């Protein structure tokens, strides 16, 4: 497509786009305004009809006054005689006399439009009887409104008679004759739809939904030529009972559409004239000069002479600037050509003097596999001169092993991949040496070549061989270490089994010894006091040894127990342990402070044993303290949670802290505090199984604090043992 054709296309397309935008905008904005005006006029017409219907209440009010006065003058409380003319004179269809309590005393009905009598059913009379109740809500006792008698809407007015005991009701049906009368007065066609009838049109249902949603004047576009407006009527009791609809021609909307059409046609004609004028101007003043400039530039390309310059017009416009820019570009091309010459010379020097070997190999036709060019480093590396090297093929330099993979490497390179590979080459003297090549596809003057960078890796190979020897030695040491670890694990397993077996086998004799001692102690006769003392000591020793065996069994089980990780509430465990201790020693008064909802990850059974031992120790070693206090909580520490159990009991000397977690190790005499010396060893083993650590801080006579973690810490030092919890 020529520039002239593109110019015409752009101008015409722009014009039609603007015309389309204008049409859409007019349709959205102007037609919306006409539609809004149309709905406003329609709402006014609907209101006129409603006002005309509401005027009926004024007529009924006057008629009810006349009827009330007639009743008051005659003193009757019922309708008698021929009152048909009254219906016609007062334009009413229903007259009823009711008591103040709502009882219908007398009633008559007629069709005054057609001058014939009518009948009120019991349901109609029951509906009329509901009206007097509304009189108490008005100041003068007069009630007016709309009620449904069956499915017929009745406009009615009720007022009290002079005696105050009875009320008279006058009503007029809002039937077809009445609607025709209102239509003649307002000149609008009216349709009524009672809401009790199930046969309703779709637009009436939509209008009712609009009224329910708070729309004051709903409307409905029936088709392109008609629009409907609606008015909702509520009965005397405030319930919607009737919808009136009027249908009008969409005259305003049609006028708006016609006006928009005329405007768009006018703009189309004016735009067409404008486009023609613009095209004539562009072709004469711009495109002609562009064509001339194009011919001059084409001649430059044909002649390949970058020293030629374009003539510049005397007119100072964009085209003159373009010619100047082209001349500047020619200046740059001339300068670039010189720089390219210099660059080629620099790259030739870099190629020839590069310290790494560079070889260019042919890839097509008769040049395939032949060394096209090589630098001095490549020649020296292989022991040839540059001229000698360029007479060889790459297969002459490759060893047999390297030639076996040469075809695969060439295929990968021809596919566009840059390849790095270790190969072996021959020197001129026949010796072999390893090199690492990095080669890829390059294109010169329309032909494909392989550009390869070669590096002698003899030194690196020696280093790799040395490293391999060291790695073999490391693997051997690791194998020996794994063997020793397996032996250690087996020894630990055998030790645990032995511990369990010994503890289990000792339980039977101890149980019998304890039982016999208890029998002797229960025998009141035949044993003197000294013998009883000896037997009691034997029994106590047996009980202590039983506790020792239980502790050993527990310690043995820990190494074989299955570890089941879970989320464990340590606070709940601490509370239950304290409760058990209080039940075992109800006379002791011990204050406990347990932090709420301390959650830890670990094995629930193992953590129960851990908390039982730590809190049990705190309970035991604070037994001789008057105001005993036991605390459990967490420290505001760093990367992992730190838990603690603290007491203000006997404490211990920190110089013995390294013995705390050893089996059978005790820092207090058995006569002071009972125990087996296995509890803290059990605690340490549980903590270790969770990947944590445990340590203690204490002072003789001022209590002790045991800290522990239940997961691996990134790192810790001696200073890390101070978690920041104030023990005072």
Image (tube, grey):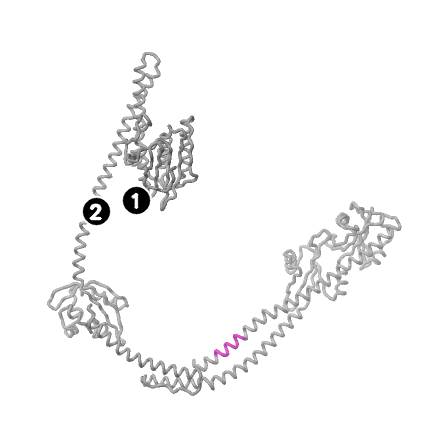
Q: Position of residue 561 (x, y in %)?
A: 32, 36
Q: Which range is magenta?
A: 9-18
Q: Position of residue 705 (x, y in %)?
A: 35, 36
Q: Position of residue 78 (x, y in %)?
A: 85, 48
- Identify the residue at the far left of this view: 429
* Count of numbered circles in the view: 2
Q: Residue at the spot x=69%, y=58% of the render?
A: 232
> What kind of element bears circle 1?
loop
User: Magenta segment: does it hold 17?
Assistant: yes
Question: Residue under circle 1?
Answer: 717
Q: Earlier in the sequence, mark 1 or mark 2?
A: 2
Q: Which of the 4 quarters of the picture holds residue 178?
A: bottom right
Number of the label disc, if any, that sits on residue 478: 2
Q: Is residue 459 left or right of residue 694?
A: left
Residue 453 in view (yes/no): yes
Q: Residue at the spot x=26%, y=71% of the render?
A: 442
Main SS of residues in magenta: helix
Q: Is residue 555 left or right of residue 287?
A: left
- Identify the residue at the far right of this view: 74
Instruction: Quote the CA–CA distance across marks 1 and 2.
Output: 28 Å
Q: Which of the 4 quarters of the picture holds residue 696?
A: top left
636 or 111, which is in the foreground? 636
How crowded pointer 2 is (Cα within 10 Å; few <14, some 14-19, many 20+) is rated as: few
> What kind of element bears circle 2?
helix
Q: Is residue 63 left or right of residue 252?
A: right
Up/down of 251 relative to 510, above or below: below
Please identify the quadrant where the N terminus is shown. Answer: bottom left
- Identify the residue at the far top of this view: 526
625 or 139, which is in the foreground? 625
Up/down of 418 relative to 558, above or below: below
User: Magenta segment: does it hold 100?
Assistant: no
């Amino acid at each position: 497509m020529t520039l002239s054709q593109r110019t015409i296309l752009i101008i015409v397309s722009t014009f039609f786009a603007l015309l389309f935008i204008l049409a859409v905008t007019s349709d959205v904005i102007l037609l919306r305004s006409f539609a809004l005006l149309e709905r406003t006029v329609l709402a006014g017409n609907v209101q006129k009809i409603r006002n005309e219907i509401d005027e009926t209440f004024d007529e009924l009010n006057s008629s009810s006054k006349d009827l009330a006065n007639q009743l008051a003058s005659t003193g009757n409380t019922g309708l008698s005689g021929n009152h048909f003319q009254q219906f016609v004179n007062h334009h009413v269809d229903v007259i009823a006399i009711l008591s103040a309590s709502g009882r219908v005393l007398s009633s008559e009905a007629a069709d005054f439009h057609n001058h014939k009598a009518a009948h009120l059913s019991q349901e109609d009379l029951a509906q009329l009887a509901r009206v007097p109740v509304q009189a108490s809500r008005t100041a003068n006792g007069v009630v007016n409104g709309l009620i449904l008698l069956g499915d017929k809407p009745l406009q009615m007015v009720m007022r009290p008679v002079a005696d105050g005991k009875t009320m008279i009701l006058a009503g007029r049906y809002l039937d077809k004759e009445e609607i025709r009368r209102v239509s003649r007065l307002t000149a609008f066609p009216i349709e009524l739809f009672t809401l009790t009838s199930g046969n309703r049109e779709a637009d009436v249902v939509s209008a009712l939904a609009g009224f329910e949603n708070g729309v004051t004047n709903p409307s409905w576009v029936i088709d392109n030529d008609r629009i409907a407006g609606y008015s909702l009527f509520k009965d005397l009791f405030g319930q919607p009972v009737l919808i009136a609809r009027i249908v009008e021609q969409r005259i305003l909307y049609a006028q708006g559409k016609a006006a928009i059409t005329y405007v768009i046609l006018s703009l189309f004609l004016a735009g067409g004239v404008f486009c023609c004028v613009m095209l004539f101007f562009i072709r004469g003043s711009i495109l002609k000069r562009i064509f001339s400039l194009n011919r001059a530039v084409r001649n430059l390309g044909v002649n390949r002479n970058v020293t030629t310059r374009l003539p510049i017009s005397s007119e100072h416009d964009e085209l003159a600037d373009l010619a100047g820019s082209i001349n500047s570009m020619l200046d740059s091309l001339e300068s670039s050509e010189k720089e390219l010459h210099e660059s080629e010379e620099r790259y030739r020097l870099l190629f020839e003097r590069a310290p790494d070997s560079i070889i260019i190999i042919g890839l097509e036709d008769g040049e395939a596999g032949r060394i096209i060019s090589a630098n001095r480093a490549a020649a020296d590396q292989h022991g040839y001169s540059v001229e000698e090297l360029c007479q060889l093929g790459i297969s002459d330099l490759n060893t047999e092993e390297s030639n076996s993979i040469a075809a695969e490497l060439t295929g990968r390179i021809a596919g566009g991949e840059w390849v790095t590979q270790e190969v072996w080459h021959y020197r001129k003297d026949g010796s072999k040496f390893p090199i690492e090549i990095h080669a890829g596809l390059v294109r010169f003057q329309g032909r494909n070549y392989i550009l390869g960078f070669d590096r002698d890796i003899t030194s690196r190979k020696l280093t790799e061989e040395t490293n391999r020897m060291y790695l073999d030695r490391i693997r051997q040491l690791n194998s020996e270490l794994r063997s020793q670890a397996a032996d250690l694990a087996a020894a630990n397993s055998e030790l645990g089994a032995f511990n369990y077996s010994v503890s289990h086998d000792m339980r039977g004799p101890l149980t019998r010894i304890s039982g016999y001692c208890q029998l002797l102690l229960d025998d009141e006769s035949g044993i003197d006091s000294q013998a009883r003392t000896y037997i009691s000591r034997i029994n106590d020793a047996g009980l202590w040894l039983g506790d020792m065996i239980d502790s050993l069994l527990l310690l043995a089980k820990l190494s074989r127990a299955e570890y089941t990780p879970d989320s464990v509430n340590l606070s709940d465990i601490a509370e239950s342990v304290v409760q058990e201790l209080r039940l075992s020693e109800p006379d002791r008064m011990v204050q406990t402070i347990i932090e709420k909802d301390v959650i830890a990850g670990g094995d629930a059974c193992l953590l129960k044993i851990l908390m039982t031992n730590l809190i049990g120790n705190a309970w035991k070693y604070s037994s001789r303290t008057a105001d005993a206090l036991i605390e459990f909580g967490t420290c505001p520490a760093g990367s992992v949670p730190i838990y603690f159990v603290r007491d203000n009991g006997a404490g211990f000397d920190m110089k013995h802290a390294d013995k705390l977690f050893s089996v059978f190790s005790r820092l207090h005499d058995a006569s002071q505090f009972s125990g087996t010396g296995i509890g803290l060893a059990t605690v340490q083993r549980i903590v270790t199984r969770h990947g944590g650590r445990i340590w203690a801080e204490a002072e003789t006579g001022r209590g002790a604090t045991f800290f522990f973690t239940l997961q691996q810490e990134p790192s810790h030092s001696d200073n890390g043992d101070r978690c920041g919890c104030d023990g005072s």
